[in-house]
Image: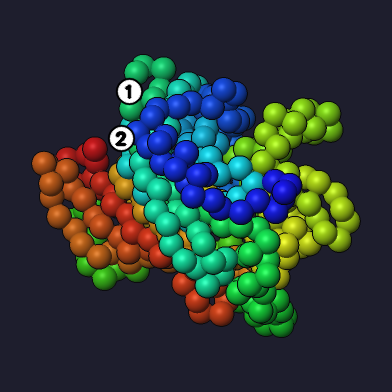
Amino acid sequence: MTQEHAVITDEMVDVLRKRIGVEWTPREPYYNTASTKDAILHFAQGIGDPNPLWADEEYARKTRYGCIIAPPCFLYSVYWPSGRSGLPGIHAWHSGNDWEFYKPILLSDEFTYKCILTDVVEKRSRMAGRTIIVYGDTYYWNQRGEMVAKAKGWSVRAERRASGEAGKYRAIPKATYTSEQLKKIYEDYEKEEIRGAAPRYWEDVNEGDEMTPVVKGPLTLRDMNTWLMGAGSPYMRAHGMALTYQKRHPGIAMVDSQSGQVDVPELVHMEDTRAQEIGLPGAYDYGCQRISWLGHLLTNWMGDDGFLKRLYAELRLFNVVGDTTWCKGKVAKKYIENGVHLVDIECWGENQRGEITMPGRATVALPSKRLPAR
């Protein structure tokens, strides 16, 4: 049996479960190890976020940080907290994250991180039969020894052949647009509102307040490539370096049945034939890319003096090339806890078919008219 046709066995699951609670760090840096000016800019460009706090040094010097900072989800470029671990040859779908942010990411911060596998759960799926959900925690520290964030991540693991044969999602219709529909999307881009230097005070927020949506799409391969330029990739290497990596990790090999080429499974985000191998109609977005779009929505709304404390998102439906996503949110609750003025937010990603592909929630600390945000 080749790795391409690997099946989930009891032995594989037992080996994975024995790793629960064991701390580990990848032998090679994932992508970014520091929040340099260029790294922050490339990440912001990768999610289409024009906030001057990430890029304009003169603007940023006038904020409470005194320098450029990185969007909270920049930590995806340090390491993807997907919970993915073990099970060679078994496909993985990044299915969600629960972020807790403790410190801002300042210009030129340097990062270390560690991962811990926390749970392995078996389920049956209409899409792929026997599936395993793998959960893990990732912790991030800066060069001052401060914990910057913690992220819980989880991935659904399934056999590629079983998923391809089931084809549950193959019938997703390819998005088409009239000129009027495209005009509406472009108008929504123009409506984007960056709160920026104008403080959003906690006292001025009301439960039920709606956020100005952030639109992403229609999704193209350009968007995926730009994301990779900013956030990096666990598998992408070139030419001989790619072959060396594949020899060291044979479980990543994925055969394209139409061309016969062997390559990394990450190409499901770029090549229709690869995505069709696992039962989808075509290439689709990265899960952490889409969650970062929610981060864009939230930082737009909270302004420079706000602080994103928590972001939870589930990736429920696929977002294939051609789809458009509107990131939306509304205030669910406001309260004071330990002297901090907090707002709980219901947020989500919704496609052009009116489907919620990514339900989420967040907590933001806002400045008070009496106290700054913390």
Q: Would you call the spot at circle 2 few (<14 residues within 10 Å), some (14-19), or many (20 or more)?
A: some
Q: What is the three-letter code of the residue carrying label 2?
A: Tyr
Q: Is mark 1 on a helix, strand or loop?
A: loop
Let me know if residue 17 appears in the view: yes
**Image quadrant containing the C terminus:** top left
State the CA–CA distance, disc 1 to disc 2.
Answer: 9 Å
Question: Which residue carries the number 2 mark?
Answer: 102
Q: What element carries label 2?
A: loop
For the residues bearing labels 1 and 2, Cβ distance under 8 angstroms? yes
Which x, y percent locates residue 222? 73, 54
Name above or below for residue 252 compared with residue 148. Answer: below
At a point 87% along the width and 53% down the height, the residue shown is: 260
Give the quadrant of residue 259: bottom right
Q: Would you call the spot at circle 1 few (<14 residues within 10 Å), some (14-19), or many (20 or more)?
A: few
Name above or below for residue 357 compared with residue 196. Answer: below
Which x, y percent locates residue 88? 61, 42
Answer left or right for 94 relative to 176. left
Name above or below for residue 15 compared with residue 22. Answer: below
In the image, 366 versus 116, the foreground residue is: 116
Which x, y percent locates residue 287? 54, 54
Q: What is the three-letter code of the residue carrying label 1?
A: Glu
At a point 26% along the width and 46% down the height, the residue shown is: 365
Question: Which residue carries the number 1 mark?
Answer: 146
Let me know if residue 51 appears in the view: no
At a point 85% along the width and 49% down the height, the residue shown is: 261
Ranked by sequence position, the earlier of labels 1 and 2 is 2
Answer left or right for 267 relative to 26. right
